[in-house]
Amino acid sequence: MAWTWRFEKADGTEVEPAVQPEEFTTQGDAESWLGESWKDLLEGGADQVVLFDGDAKIYGPMNLHADA
């Protein structure tokens, strides 16, 4: 399975990410990418993210705002 992120507004509406992610082979790779990209994603209009392994939701929504 591939690990992927879903990018959302605060109300749960899906948005296109400002930084185009790849499909990751491990959860650690996906989380590392998010750690490097979250500020650009936030500036591009995403408020929160949800992590999936294939079709299975792993966790989220996780707020990208530092003060949350």
Image (cartoon, helix red, strand yellow):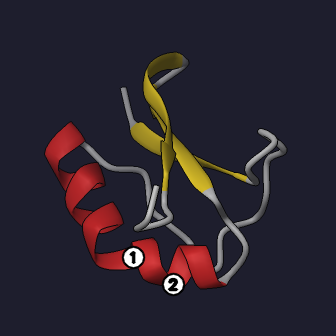
Question: x, y (%) of residue 64?
Answer: 48, 61
Q: Which residue lies at the image location 20% right of the left edge and 61% below the top edge?
A: 32
Q: Which residue lies at the image location 45% right of the left edge and 81% below the top edge?
A: 39
Establish if 39 lies above or below 31.
Answer: below
**Residue at label 2?**
40
Question: x, y (%) of residue 15?
Answer: 79, 58
Q: Is residue 22 visible?
A: yes
CB within 8 Å, label 1 to label 2:
yes
- Label 1 secondary element: helix
**In the image, 9: left or right of 21?**
right
Amino acid tagged 1: Ser
**In the image, 50: left or right of 17?**
left
Question: x, y (%) of residue 36?
Answer: 28, 77
**In the image, 35: left or right of 11?**
left
- Label 2 secondary element: helix
Camera-nearest residue between 59 and 19: 59
Q: Residue furthest front?
A: 67
Marker disc for residue 37: 1
Question: What is the quadrant of the N terminus in the image?
Answer: top left
